């Protein structure tokens, strides 16, 4: 099975193998909570705007705190940081479970806990992204590890929502939150069992403002990183925010319930899994820039078609295209940035990556929720699709200039020949 060995080569590293196994369990619970929280908000309020507000609350800290989090992640031990963030996330889920199971949960409590979750993620995401390179024994396996991360996330987004739909329909949202809280034990245990041998590159700490300025200057003056993060931010804001309206599509457009919501989320995950599996089979990162441009366009086309659909079977055929496009855009973006970034600035750059990926989503959630309240959910999703199409054209025009900068870096690393 040579192809299988190629696809999972990052699992040769013991630390990454531990992380992969623990995170695979925990992410199923995480996706159950996402579905349960959105359905709970819709059940309590029937409001597209409040669905957007909850999404905003859970994601805005990554945008506001991202740069500072990056500076601190470059200073702190990343393994210990992740243990703390996962323990706090467990407390958040269990608190939400207690409120939901006792029947006293109110919308302001959901918003507050979503905000707390966002604060955790503001530090967890740059630490997690930066820690990947310390978990793989061979640097050439980094791209494969990032692709496997995508496979893991999207496999969980296929299984988790399907389970959540059944659990919500039978016993309510509270048990989804409870299962999620317990699932964090797996990832915390995997982090505690790791033996890190790849040392974290650190410099003596300086003023936070100096390190912030240094990180921003590095991102701003690097054409490849700046262009990739700009495109990623656009896709995160307009491409991914469609999911905040899934409860409305499930209940009002497709005339279903929580099971329909689970099916919509799982359908997108099918395409995302196909997208990540294809990336694990790549031997080289050469050509990923072109893939980013094409994938952004695919996402836009998929969203427009989804907005036009009023049949569940058709929506379930369209959403895999959206999931495929999103994953084929995000994972290559991560791989290229992680490959070319200076290691001592990795935490700060990955914080800006988290700002583009996670930090732009709250603005997308608010904007999409308000557009949907005025023009309907289908109209909002189609608008977002057209924005993604425009973004793909802009990024495609920059590709020749990006290649001129990236190719010498790849040549120094032995990825491509000097000639």
Image (cartoon, rainbow, N blue to C red):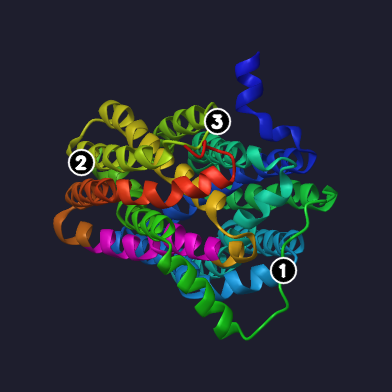
**Location of residue 64 in the rendering, given as x and y in whole percent from the top left corner:** 46, 75
Disc 2 versus disc 1: nearer the observer: 1
Tell me the residue that label 1 is attached to.
202
Residue beneath the point at 48% across and 43% down: 331
Note whether residue 134 is visible: yes
x and y percentages locating residue 56 in the rendered image: 40, 66
Which image quadrant for residue 361?
bottom left
Q: Residues within 10 Å of mark 3 (few under 14, many from 20)?
A: many
Q: CA distance from mark 2 to mark 1?
A: 46 Å
Position above or below: 257 against 52: above
Residue 318's disc is: none
Q: Are marks 1 and 3 in contact (CB under 8 Å)?
A: no
Q: Earlier in the sequence, mark 2 or mark 3?
A: 3
Q: Badge 1: how crowded within 10 Å, few (<14), some, or many (20+)?
A: few
Q: Residue at x 39, y 64 (%)?
A: 362
Image depth: mark 1 or mark 3 in front: 1
Of residue 307 and residue 18, the one placed in the foreground of this image is 18
As drawn, is 371 to the left or to the right of 102?
left
Frontmost residue, 220 versus 238? 220
Which segment did they paint magenta? 349-370
Asked if the residue under mark 1 is in contact with the one under mark 2, i.e. CB atoms within 8 Å, the reply is no
Residue at x-position 57% and y-position 53% = 174
| Distance (Cα) linking label 1 and label 3 | 30 Å
Q: Sequence-wise, which precedes: disc 2 or disc 1? A: 1
Q: Main secondary structure of the magenta part?
A: helix
Residue, disc 3: 280
The quarter holding residue 308 reads top left
Whether tag 2 and tag 3 are in contact, CB under 8 A, the answer is: no
């Amino acid at each position: 099975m040579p192809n299988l060995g190629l696809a999972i080569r990052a699992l040769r590293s013991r630390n990454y193998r531990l992380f992969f196994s623990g995170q695979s369990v925990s992410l199923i619970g995480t996706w159950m909570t996402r579905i349960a929280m959105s359905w709970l908000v819709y059940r309590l309020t029937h409001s597209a705007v409040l669905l957007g507000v909850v999404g905003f609350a859970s994601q805005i800290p990554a945008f506001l705190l991202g740069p500072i989090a990056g500076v601190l992640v470059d200073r702190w031990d990343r393994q210990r940081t992740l243990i703390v963030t996962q323990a706090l996330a467990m407390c958040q889920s269990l608190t939400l479970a207690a409120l939901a199971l006792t029947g006293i949960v109110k919308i302001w409590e959901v918003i507050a806990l979503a905000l707390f979750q966002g604060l955790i993620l503001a530090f967890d995401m740059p630490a997690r992204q930066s820690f990947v390179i310390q978990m793989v024994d061979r640097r050439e396996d980094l791209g494969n590890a990032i692709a496997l991360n995508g496979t893991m996330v999207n496999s969980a987004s296929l299984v988790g929502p399907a389970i959540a739909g059944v659990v919500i329909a039978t016993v309510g949202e509270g048990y989804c939150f409870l299962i999620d809280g317990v699932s964090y034990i797996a990832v915390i245990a995997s982090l505690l069992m790791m033996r890190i041998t790849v040392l974290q590159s650190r410099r003596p700490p300086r003023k936070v403002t100096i390190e912030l300025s240094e990180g921003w200057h590095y991102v701003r003056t690097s054409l490849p990183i700046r262009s990739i993060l700009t495109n990623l931010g656009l896709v995160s804001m307009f491409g991914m925010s469609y999911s905040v309206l899934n409860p409305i599509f499930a209940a009002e457009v497709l005339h279903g319930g929580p099971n329909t919501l689970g099916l919509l989320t799982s359908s997108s995950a099918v395409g995302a899994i196909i997208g990540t599996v294809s990336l694990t089979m790549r031997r080289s990162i050469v050509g990923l820039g072109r893939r980013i441009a094409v994938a952004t366009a695919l996402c836009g086309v998929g969203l427009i078609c989804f907005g036009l659909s009023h049949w569940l079977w058709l929506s379930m055929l369209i959403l895999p295209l959206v999931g495929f496009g999103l994953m084929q855009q995000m994972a290559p973006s991560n791989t290229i940035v992680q490959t070319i970034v200076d290691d001592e600035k990795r935490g700060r750059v990955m914080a800006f990556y988290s700002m583009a990926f996670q930090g732009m989503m709250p603005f997308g959630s608010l904007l999409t929720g308000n557009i949907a309240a005025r023009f309907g959910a289908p109209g909002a999703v189609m608008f977002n699709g057209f924005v993604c199409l425009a973004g793909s054209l802009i990024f495609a025009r920059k590709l020749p200039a990006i290649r001129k900068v990236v190719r010498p870096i790849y040549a120094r690393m032995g990825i491509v020949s000097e000639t």
